[in-house]
Image: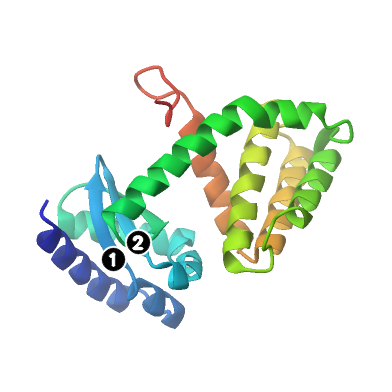
Amino acid sequence: MKSAALSLLWVNCIERLKDRINNRSFWEAIETTHAITIEGDILIIGLDPDNFNRATHLNQVSHMHAISEVVQELFNQPLKVRVIEGTTAQDWVLTKERDARIATMKQSTTVRKIKEDSELEGWDGLYEYIARLYMQTPHRAMPQGKARYANEALYVLVEAMDTLYPEHPDDMVERSLARCLERIASSADMPATVIAFELERLRAWRKPGVDGQEEGAS
């Protein structure tokens, strides 16, 4: 799809979403977005760095659900929507490169780091590890620092769940997971439901794809 057509469709999506969602913070966030490209079944939407903290208003579960529905209606195809930092095709290239580096790094180091941490034993140890991780995050008082912390903590949590979260978790396990999610949310200054949603997306991304390879793997 040509850039001009893509931009026009997205502008129409914005107007329809403003009629559908009565939330001023959402309006202010969606108005600053730019449609960058469609890759596969994903519509890439960008926010410039100065406004990227507004992405939390777009990524709320109910808001993202509405965005996806409107996009499907106007684009006439089922598209997922991803919000990135940046507004150009090059920003999307850099985001994909960063995703690949993070995926490679996490696959090779996160499990080892967790297992080598002698204090990390069970859910209590995981909770303490996540708390310490925030204190070790550079620029943690700034929005971008909080976002980086949330991203790192979610990767740690999803790896730990491979051993701590059984296929059929009981109430105690669910409460322990919720406690960790709420700790991340509090430190990152984000709604706990958004953190939980991102965790589910990350876990789904790590599951084997239809071709037998792990999604996200090159």
Q: CA distance from mark 2 to mark 1?
A: 5 Å
Give the left or right position of residue 48, taking residue 38 as reference.
right
Residue kind at label 2, given as amino acid type: Gly
* Residue 109, placed above or below residue 37: above
Viewer can see residue 22 = no
Residue kind at label 1, given as amino acid type: His
* Residue 162, placed above or below residue 88: above
- Give the residue pinned by disc 2: 46
- Residue 139: image location, x then y, percent: 67, 63
Which mark is on residue 150? none
Quadrant of the rendered image containing residue 142: bottom right
User: Which residue is located at x 55 percent, y 57 percent?
Assistant: 194
Viewer can see residue 74 = yes
- Residue 151: image location, x then y, percent: 59, 49
- Residue 57: image location, x then y, percent: 47, 69
User: Which residue is located at x 51 percent, y 69 percent?
Assistant: 53
Q: How is the image coloured?
A: rainbow
Quadrant of the rendered image containing residue 116: top right
Label 2 packing within 10 angstroms: few (<14), some (14-19), many (20+) = many
User: Which residue is located at x 69 percent, y 58 percent?
Assistant: 138
Helix, strand or loop status at disc 2? strand
- Give the residue pinned by disc 1: 34
